[in-house]
Image (cartoon, rainbow, N blue to C red):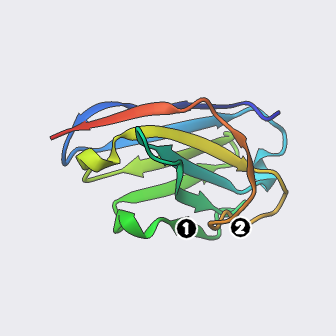
Amino acid sequence: QVPLVESGGGLVQAGGSLRLSCAASGGSFSMSAMGWFRQAPGKEREFVAGIHWNAGSTYYSDSLNGRFTISRDNAKNMVYLQMNSLKPEDTAVYYCAQDRRLLGSGRPGTDFGFWGQGTQVTVSS
């Protein structure tokens, strides 16, 4: 088990911004691809963004249209999701996830086997 703790969620008006953070406690973080997912009420969990283990590449859901940015700080064992121009349809629980394997890319389809508890993001219209 790899402890992952998300923070930064909350209530924001449409058009606003939030920055989610994920703190990882495991020693393998700096060699692991990371991702963000979200799950809205009544919907399946979906991939939002992924980042290569060394931050060399990032991947995003096509539906975001460039509004979100994933980043990481391996020295601090942190991964972030900057969310701009938020819309009511972005309302969901957002989860941080870590690749089961080392030295992965974080692209969609990555075996993200370790998960945080999630943080709620609510966007009001």
Count of marks, rendered view: 2
Graded by Cα atoms within 10 Å as few (under 14), some (14 to 19) or many (20 or more), the crowding at tag 1 reads some
Cβ–Cβ under 8 Å for marks 1 and 2: yes
- Lateral position of residue 42 relative to residue 104, left or right: left
Q: Position of residue 105 (x, y in %)?
A: 71, 67
Examine the rendered structure and indicate whether residue 117 appears above or below residue 14.
Answer: above
Mark drawn on residue 105: 2
Inter-mark Cα distance, 1 to 2? 9 Å
Kindly indicate the quadrant of the structure image that contains residue 122. Answer: top left
Residue at 42 percent of width and 31 percent of height: 120
Examine the rendered structure and indicate whether residue 79 appears above or below residue 62.
Answer: above
Is residue 8 visible in this depiction of the protein? no
- Lateral position of residue 27 relative to residue 114, left or right: right
Mark drawn on residue 59: 1
Residue situated furthest front in the rendering: 42
Residue at 36 percent of width and 50 percent of height: 83
Is residue 104 visible in this depiction of the protein? yes
Residue at 84 percent of width and 39 percent of height: 27
Q: Secondary structure at mark 2?
A: loop
